[in-house]
Amino acid sequence: MNIPSRALAEDLLLEAQQLNPGSWVDHSVLVGQAAGIFAAHLPGLDPQAAAILGLLHDIGRRAGVTDIRHCIDGYTYLHGLGFEDAARICITHIFAIQDIQAANGTWDCSENEIQFIRQYLAGLQYDDYDRLIQLCDASPFRQVSA
């Protein structure tokens, strides 16, 4: 899987927090914790990878306060660093079904970005990591324990 190490993921999140502080950072930590815990009980999933993907799913928020746009900002950022699998989660985590009409939020992307997302989603088959991060992202975790 093409993702950063846990240490690098934590550094990227810390840098993002400095650029755009907010509750989204704590949310990302909780999603990462929950994803790691769930993955430990699901055949075929790597708990460490799941935790890293959860930590980074909202990394696009580093660019500022946005709505749906954070998914493309996160994808662009992580893709540029060479972490395609982590970049993928930045997009897939907000689309429970692979249809941009199903997005919950305000479209604050350009038409070219919307077209990219549409084509990107059409070319995928969601895997268990996509679904796990979607589940954890949508859950109202306050504190997670093993």
Image (tube, rainbow, N blue to C red):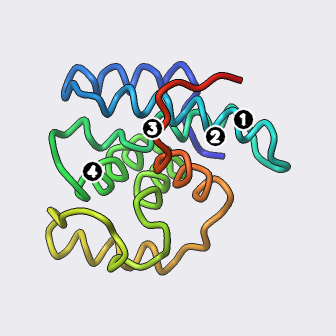
The residue that disc 1 covers is 47
Q: Earlier in the sequence, mark 1 or mark 3?
A: 1
The residue that disc 2 covers is 50
The residue that disc 3 covers is 56
The residue that disc 4 covers is 70
Give the residue drawn at x 60%, y 58%.
131
Q: Earlier in the sequence, mark 2 or mark 4?
A: 2
> What element does badge 3 sit on?
helix
Dot 3 alpha-carbon crowd within 10 angstroms: few under 14, some 14 to 19, many 20 or more: many
Mark 1–mark 3 Cα distance, whole angstroms, equals 14 Å
Dot 2 alpha-carbon crowd within 10 angstroms: few under 14, some 14 to 19, many 20 or more: many
Q: Where does the image place residue 50, in percent across and percent down from the top left?
A: 63, 40
Label 1 amino acid? Pro
Q: Where does the image place residue 75, in percent across and percent down from the top left?
A: 37, 52
Mark 1–mark 2 Cα distance, whole angstroms, equals 5 Å
Give the residue drawn at x 53%, y 19%.
7
> What element does badge 4 sit on?
helix
Tally the marks. 4
Q: Earlier in the sequence, mark 3 or mark 2?
A: 2
Label 3 amino acid? Leu
Dot 4 alpha-carbon crowd within 10 angstroms: few under 14, some 14 to 19, many 20 or more: many
Dot 1 alpha-carbon crowd within 10 angstroms: few under 14, some 14 to 19, many 20 or more: many
Q: Is residue 67 above or below residue 140?
A: below
Label 4 amino acid? His
Label 2 amino acid? Ala
Q: Quadrant of the C terminus?
A: top right
Mark 2–mark 4 Cα distance, whole angstroms, equals 20 Å
Q: Is residue 48 above or below residue 121?
A: above
